[in-house]
Amino acid sequence: MFNSFGNILKLTTFGESHGTAIGGVIDGFPAGVKVDLDAVQKELDRRRPGQSKIVTQRKEPDTVEFLSGIFDGKTTGASIGFVIKNTNQKSKDYNHNTNVYRPSHADYTYDKKYGIRDHRGGGRTSARETANWVVAGALAKQLISHISINAFTSSVGAIFINKPYQDLDFSKTETNDVRCPDLDTADKMITKIKEIRKEGDTIGGTITCVLQNMPVGLGEPIFHKLHAELGKAMLSINAVKGFEFGSGFCGAKMKGSEHNDIFNPDGSTKTNLSGGIQGGISNGMDVYFRVAFKPVATIMQNQATINSEGEAKEIQGKGRHDPCVVPRAVPIVEALAALVVADFYLMNKTRSI
């Protein structure tokens, strides 16, 4: 398996959802960076289960323990090792699918590829892995603290924020369970998720992420384009089905005369349909993108499926699952965006030496 992400700033992770622990090793992190460990834990708390009535009620504290690479509150330049203990697994909730493939999960493909799978919560394919990314992303945020990274829930099902991000107050994102900075829309989203949960079903949505105070020059013109690496990162998140930046798919409906971003004398642009990236390189304007999440595959309804012998079976989800993954995915999107941008930031610093 490929268990590493990044170039100069590289994260390698380990662990399964129902194992003893998950964790990771971060290489390439510069020495001498002051680390706020409480801020790292706060990011994990934003992702952890059981934080509200519209997410899974599993109680997992997600407490991170750093093993190396930090001394006297600063990074040493050595590998940063960390672990997060698994403390609230209920493996018996998955006994019903030991030999049965859950629809739209990785059960079938994993089994066919490797010839073995951990049926307890998906093992290595579980979204529990994303807690590791949040730890690394929280450290990356502190490395590039001059860049502001704000993600938020922009839609749940057919309920959308009908405002541009420039009209939103990001300080309100954390004031509600769904992490939507438009409070009227947030109420509608929460009501919808509760309705879906009562039906034993799930629902998808989108997350928008905005990167502000971006420098000019992050990204490469051929491979390793900034938007390509952001897209790769976002599409690595469980349940993500789409990524668009700038004008995205709406840009396909426009004429060039409508879409072109006209320059100001200082190099900024009057509009920003490019999404802060031109030719794969950041241009100093806001970088913004949207990520689409499918409905969670585990539903509390009977579904037809097959087992490993190809025999027809019926299955119903059991245990504790999110009716909508989007609210808990907001910090994951921010974390991966921070890792990508911090990696490019270090590439540029290496070039200047």
Image: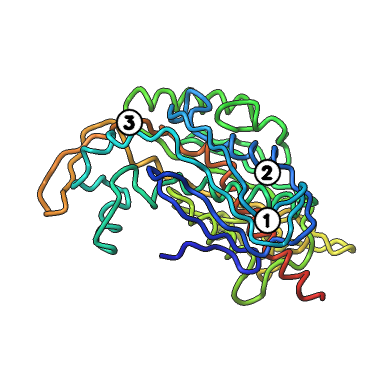
Residue name at image x 76 percent, y 68 percent: 217
Residue name at image x 32 percent, y 38 percent: 298
Please say if 220 is above or below 46.
below
Please say if 224 is above or below 5.
below
Q: Nearer the viewer, residue 167 or 136?
A: 136
**Label 3 vs label 1: CA separation?**
37 Å
Please say if 135 is above or below 3.
above
Q: Nearer the viewer, residue 67 or 37?
A: 67
Residue name at image x 60 percent, y 63 percent: 10
Q: Nearer the viewer, residue 14 or 267?
A: 14
Q: Nearer the viewer, residue 51 or 59?
A: 59
Mark 3 highlights which residue?
Answer: 319
353 relative position to 22: left or right? right
Amino acid type at circle 1 is Gly
The C terminus, quarter of image: bottom right
Q: Residues within 10 Å of mark 1 (few under 14, many from 20)?
A: some
Amino acid type at circle 3 is Gly
Residue name at image x 79 percent, y 49 percent: 34
Coordinates of residue 218 in the picture (x, y in percent): 72, 66
Amino acid type at circle 2 is Asn
314 relative position to 259: left or right? left
- Of discs 2 and 1, which sits in the foreground? 1
Mark 2 highlights which residue?
Answer: 150
Of the numbered discs in the image, which one, if any, rests on residue 69? 1
Earlier-in-chain disc, 2 versus 1: 1
